[in-house]
Image (cartoon, rainbow, N blue to C red):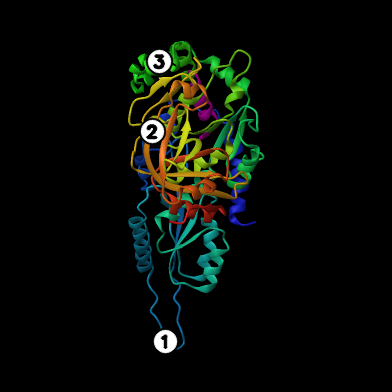
Amino acid sequence: MNLFSRRKVLASISGAALGSLLLPVKRVSELLHLKTTGIAALVEGKKSNNPFAEGNSLRPRGIVKIKPIYIGIEVNFPWSYPNTPLSRQELEERTKQMVDRFKENSKVDFVKLETPLIIVEHSDYRKLKAELSYDTDALLVGGERLPLIDYSLSRIGLPVIWGQADVDFLRGLRVKKVLSESKVLYFGEYPSDSIRYNNSPRHLFNCEDRFGIRVKQIDTHEFYSLFDSHREDKVRKELENWRKDFDETSQTEESHKLSLVKDEKDLLDVARIYMTLRDLVLREDANGICVNCSKLWIQDRKHIFPCLAYDRLIDEGIMCACEGDMGNMVSSLILNAVSGDQPVLQGNTRWRPDEGIIYIQHDVIPFSMARTKHKIRNYHAKGWGVTAYAEINNQNGPMTVINIDSGFSKVGVVEGKIRDSYEPTDQEASEGACRFRVNMTIRGDLLKAQPVLNVGSQHNAMTFGHWLPALEEAGKLLDLEVVRLDY
């Protein structure tokens, strides 16, 4: 059993123990979203106010830990003059230079370098296994290259970095680390009736077997038990905190009169959904939510949708997938990790070759991905439920769309640009069109991009920026084929 296998066993044991802890409920934005400054402080060894920093109550996800090793064994050849061995002080200085160069050139804030090991004598090598942990992600090696030590290092099962590492490689390492530390809460029956079966993971345990992602299924009755436990004054206070992000004029728009939210109870319900999901995420130490939406409709609970709650949770670092789509859940976790915790938009992908675009349509638009306030609408012009529309940010800026297949063996990746966004009319919404649509142009042949993104379910995941090189590095580390277009 190599180090990776042993790490997986330990992670499973410790994960079960941690999952049973009941954490105090605070705002998700305070506890679950690790700000860049918090990561930087953690890497530099400073005391951080972030609750995820070491020494605080929760551990951060996605901190890539690298073990520096400097090989200082002196090699003398019979045909050359004997070399004078370097002193311990000189070896420590060279090790420090190696570490400093790595920090200066890596330009990322999610890497933490562990205490270096200097190998002066062959017996020092035996110290390495004692100094490695199941949390170590790679080895940074410098000094003399000795064939036997090179081979021994390769058998440990960790990536070996000689001198420097490409930033894309480090982002790939982060994807692997985040997935292995992730936990998803799945609500309702599995599998979902609305996801194409052939493009959906066969079993929730596949996520852990393949990537280390733990999944816990939450019964619908447990959800509603917590849902009903929230006092109305607390729910109203939460809703009031949201109103600053609402476009209040949208409630008088004649052009969307069939989409207006007329019953305040619908808004209170979605705030209550948010509070319930937030509490469960904190209790279970989860960073992903996947709801089989139609299965929230039980008995008299027929108009409960988490769409607007997702808008808030995604911005707070919790990836969310709809319709019980676990494939899209994994795609969202990958994009969030590779981009450095950016929010991710997911939804149904459609193709418009005549316009030269593809678009993603959904009833979820995270607040931070919008450049306008949210126009509050009901669900598909039906007179109940709550969704929202806002104009997409980053217009004319880069974007990446991905989709993973049901067997978790390959992922389709397409890069392009954001063109604009569009809100369907009441008529279009009533016929099934989702509330928000983002139009995008593709980098490469539009028609050839369709099979690339059709490897999985009908839902694709998108975030701002171009991340293909880093995703290719993640693919190598995860034995995941990256299907892409040739530019």
13 lies left or right of 67: right
Name the residue located 37 percent from the left edge and 33 percent from the top edge: 392
Task: Give the mark nearer the N terminus: 1 vs 2.
Answer: 1
Distance Cα–Cα, label 3 vs label 2: 31 Å
Magenta span includes 278: yes
Task: Give the mark nearer the N terminus: 3 vs 2.
Answer: 3
Q: Extreme right residue here?
A: 202
- For mark 3, give the secondary structure: helix
Q: Quadrant of the N terminus?
A: bottom right
Q: Extreme bottom residue here?
A: 79
Q: Which residue is mark 3?
A: 237
Is residue 267 placed above or below 131 in the rendered structure? above
Percent position (x, y) of residue 131?
51, 56
Question: Which kind of residue does numbered mark 1 sit on?
Answer: Ser
Question: Which kind of residue does numbered mark 2 sit on?
Answer: Ser
Name the residue located 54 percent from the left edge and 41 percent from the top edge: 330
Q: Which contiguous range is marked in magenta?
A: 272-288
Question: Which kind of residue does numbered mark 3 sit on?
Answer: Lys
Q: Which residue is mark 2?
A: 421
Q: Quadrant of the C terminus?
A: bottom left
Question: Which labelled disc corresponds to residue 91?
Answer: none
Question: Which labelled disc corresponds to residue 80?
Answer: 1
Q: Nearer the viewer, residue 216 or 415?
A: 415
Distance Cα–Cα, label 3 vs label 1: 79 Å
